[in-house]
Image: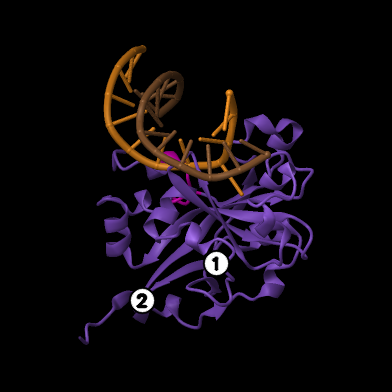
Chain colours: A purple, B brown, C orange
Amino acid sequence: MLVPMRESDAPSLRQAVKIDQGFYERPTLEVAHDLIGKVLVRRLGRSLLRGQIVETEAYIGQEDLACHASKGRTERTEVMFGPSGHAYVYMIYGMHCCLNVVTEPEGFAAAVLIRAIEPLEGLPRMRRNRRGARAASDLGSGPGKLCQAMEIDRRLNAASLSESDLWIEDRGRDPGIVLASPRIGVDYAGVWKDKPWRFFSEGNAHVSRNPLNRSGSPAR
DNA sequence: AGATGGATTTTC
DNA sequence: AAAATCCATCTC
């Protein structure tokens, strides 16, 4: 069928450049900051889902008590010790998956958690995946939500972001003002819980734990 | 608008 | 036993 696809015709979605391993193999704080505004892409057969990254968190090395690698080199954390540019997908609370991108040179365990996306392409399928969520800001405004919307689960653990059906693109989109704050949900991590290692686009309605992303909020 | 608790399974 | 969460269901 030759159905016009408005969103893929949009100028803002042209000239995509897939991000390569050199981008990921850098200090984790730089990668976490620079991923804001990049576009996460999931290929599912012939269709593509896209979302702009609006929130990330850095998890840096075995010293960082919030980082899973602080438990040492185990079956679960092995991916984080491996080469950069691979996915680290884990299950949390028995119900949700979270997506990370491995950073830094091989041997140093670190990753960036993708915490929120602003849906750009494939919204109908994302809505279906998210049990018919109405508001666009209910699709990707949290690490578990975006994995559900984009059909990301542990089968993608250790997948290369250069050679799989999951990758990140630079489309020259404007991230706006990028702010930093402490990470979410790591109160157990002692002195590490207060590190300002969470990055997000200021004022973006798709950021998690944002009053703006509540679907019931009054319009005016 | 904010607080609370349940779901559910992997991990060490 | 606790967890890098989400959601429904209370309160005020």
| Residue A38 - label | 1
In the rendered view of the protein, which quadrant contains the C terminus of chain A?
top left
Magenta residues? A203-211
Q: Earlier in the sequence, mark 1 or mark 2?
A: 1
Is A205 a magenta residue?
A: yes
Give the CA distance from mark 1 to mark 2: 22 Å
Q: Nearer the viewer, mark 1 or mark 2?
A: 2
Could you tell me which secondary element the residue under label 1 belongs to?
loop
Side (left or right) of A194 relative to A92: right
Q: Hey, which quadrant is residue A12 in on the image? A: bottom left
Chain letter of mark 1 equals: A
- Tag on residue A45? 2
Q: Position of residue A31 (x, y in %)?
A: 68, 61
Tags 1 and 2 both on a single chain? yes
- The x, y position of residue A76, in whole percent, is 63, 51
- Disc 2 marks which amino acid? Gly
The one of A130 and C1 positioned closer to us in this rendering: C1
Residue A16 in the magenta stretch? The answer is: no
